[in-house]
Image (spheres, grey):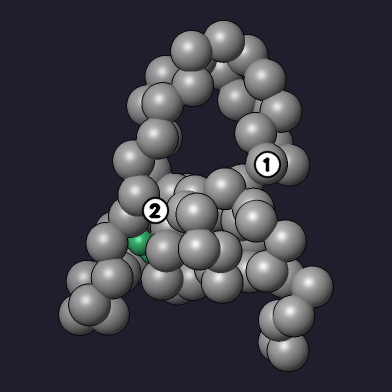
């Protein structure tokens, strides 16, 4: 979980970004779009890393059923 400073962020929903959890524009032609979220104070944000969450961009525990 990254510690993020206040600001707007774009979580990568396609898994192709070379910036890890953050969109770098690689989603073009994937049919996916990044998910914008805002951080109001510096904090450890529980972002989803497996992309199977039903509550993007946040982890909902779905990785425990992930097979990859
Ligand atoms: S690069 Fe994955 S959503 Fe933009």
**Residue lying at 41% horizontally and 26% vertically, measured from the top left:** 38
Q: Is residue 58 left or right of residue 25?
A: right
Left or right: 54 with respect to 28? right
The residue carrying mark 2 is 23
Residue farthest toward the bottom in the current orientation of the protein? 67
Residue drawn at point x = 39 percent, y = 53 percent: 23
- Mark 1 or mark 2, whichever is nearer to me: 1
For label 2, being within 8 Å of ligand 1 is answered yes
Q: Judge by depth and name the residue closer to the eye, 28 or 13.
A: 13
The secondary element bearing badge 1 is classed as loop
User: Residue 31, how many percent across, how many down?
Assistant: 22, 77
Quadrant of the rendered structure where residue 30 is?
bottom left
Which of the two residues, 50 or 53, is positioned nearer the viewer here? 53
Quadrant the N terminus occupies: top right
Q: Position of residue 13 (x, y in %)?
A: 42, 63
Mark identifier at residue 26? none
Tell me the tag on residue 46: 1
């Amino acid at each position: 979980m990254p510690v993020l400073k206040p600001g707007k962020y774009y979580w990568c929903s396609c898994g192709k970004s070379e910036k890890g959890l953050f969109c770098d524009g690689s989603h073009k032609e994937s049919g996916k779009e990044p998910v914008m979220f805002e951080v109001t104070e510096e904090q450890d944000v529980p972002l989803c890393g497996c992309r199977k969450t039903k509550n993007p961009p946040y982890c909902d525990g779905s990785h425990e059923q992930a097979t990859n």
